[in-house]
Amino acid sequence: MISFLISLVALFLGYLLYSRVAERVFGPDDRLTPAIRRADKIDYIVLPGWRIFMIQFLNIAGTGPIFGAIMGAWFGPSAYLWIVFGCIFGGAVHDYISGMISLRHDGIGQAELTGLYLGSTARKAMVVFTMLMMVLVGAFFVYCPAIILSGIWGEKMMWVGLIFLYYVATTIMPIDKVIGRVYPAFALSMLFMVVALGIVLVIKHPVLPEVWDGLGNWGAERFGLKQSIFPALFVTIACGAVSGFHATQSPMMARCMKSERQGRPIFYGAMITEGVVALVWATISNYFFFSGGWQNVCPPEVVEKFQASGLTLIQFFDAPTVVNIICSSWLGTFGSILALLGIVAAPITTGGSSFRAARLILSEAFGLKQVSARSRLLLSLPVFAVGIALLAWQIGNPSGFGTVWQYVAWGTQAMAAVTLWFSTVYLVREHKCYWLTLIPGIFMTMVVVDFLLISPTTFGLPATLSHTTAAIVTVAAIVRFIWWKRSFSKATA
């Protein structure tokens, strides 16, 4: 429990202190923002700062900081360190700098920023890659909340239809009409869930594994977990620490800000808030799996079924099951419904924003105006068509989509590495402290290359060969950067 409390304090201190370092490095000023200069009452609209924060928080959250944190905690107390250090020095910096760069460039998206700073070839690759990611995320976040909602009331397919209709509205309607009004209410449900569970944790004060008890792979020792901590932990816990998906969402909020000085609480602050969500659920996961908590919160019939199953804890109790059991046991009927609504709100809002981001990516890639509702609808039709096809495939092959989702998890970290690299190039060009993004960029490069090579769902290379190859690729990237920086310095001297 001490590790949880220390980590919680560290996240708050990270916002109070290191966010100011990031802000000082970037240097926001009083220039007019895109929301004012390019106001169109569709995508460029000034919204209140607190409302933008709520929207940004829900856009980036999804189920990642919940399910990812639960599964990441299977590795043991090392998850605490990744959430804290990853969030403060990696994810929040990533979100703040990339969001502010977008703000300085009229709110353009990640793919276009990649082109500006890493070249046209990188831009084309990122247009395709980010479009694929947005549609995959959007499709996945239709069926997942529909399953949870059908457990409360109604039929599964009814909820699928309603959620998809909601996605159509969030994609096409002006941002202040649906997203700006609905998301703050959803955010309150999400925050209620986090605060309520955090309070219960403190009151119960269970005996939990601490960081100083060992940073080894506890899951391998106790549950036969086959993945190694590096790089699997750093991909499993993405949204709660570092996630490139966030860089596709920040431009939408950059188009709604009235001042650059709002960037620190909106971009850095939302990421720290998401880190708190991940921290709470990682701690609950430690309690559930390593401290015998499952015996205290599971109904007797579930305990008997598990004991007769012959499965390990992590095989029998997946992340969604843990969420349902914990919320029902700790928060009662009413509290669990509110908590589950908060958990449902996160993927629904993220999915809707993903489709909207896909529309914006297409409009930027082909230079298409989006003022009329007809133009927005026509551009969105192919996105919806692909999303519906993926959704139909997912419903028919639920286990198959789990495999696809592993690639999506890796994809978010690959996007993070790219974002940190173009952010580094931006800081070099602006003669600012580029180490702020270079160090996490180097680390994430090593992670994504290593995971691609070692994962059994991709190349499945032996650990030694995978680590060595990933190190060589990372060193090559560093050498390429040094060469470019020297050339840039000579050209601008």
Image: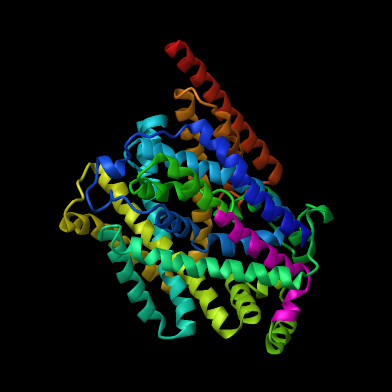
Quick check: 422 above or below 144?
above
Residue shown at 41% from the left, 81% from the top:
156
Residue shown at 47% from the left, 11% from the top:
490
Q: Quadrant of residue 254?
A: top left
Q: Is residue 25 left or right of residue 210?
A: left
- Residue 137 forms part of the magenta stretch: no
Identify the colour scheme used.
rainbow
Is residue 450 something one can see in this rendering? no
- Residue 295 forms part of the magenta stretch: yes
Is residue 61 something one can see in this rendering? yes
Main SS of the magenta part reads helix
What are the residue bounds of the magenta stretch?
273-297
Residue shown at 64% from the left, 76% from the top:
326
Q: Is residue 270 left or right of residue 229?
A: left
Q: Quadrant of the C terminus?
A: top left
Q: How far across and down, in percent of the image, does residue 279 sit?
A: 64, 59
Q: How far across and down, in percent of the image, does residue 481 sit?
A: 53, 25
Q: How far across and down, in percent of the image, does residue 201 sit?
A: 70, 69
- 378 or 371: which is nearer to us? 371
Q: Quadrant of residue 314?
A: bottom right
Q: Quadrant of residue 261?
A: top left
Quick check: 402 above or below 32?
below
Q: How many marks?
A: 0
- 424 or 477: which is nearer to us? 424
Q: How far across and down, in percent of the image, does residue 413 sit?
A: 53, 47
- 479 or 174: which is nearer to us? 174
Check the image and name the residue furthest to the bottom: 301
Check the image and name the residue furthest to the right: 213
Q: Quadrant of the N terminus?
A: bottom right
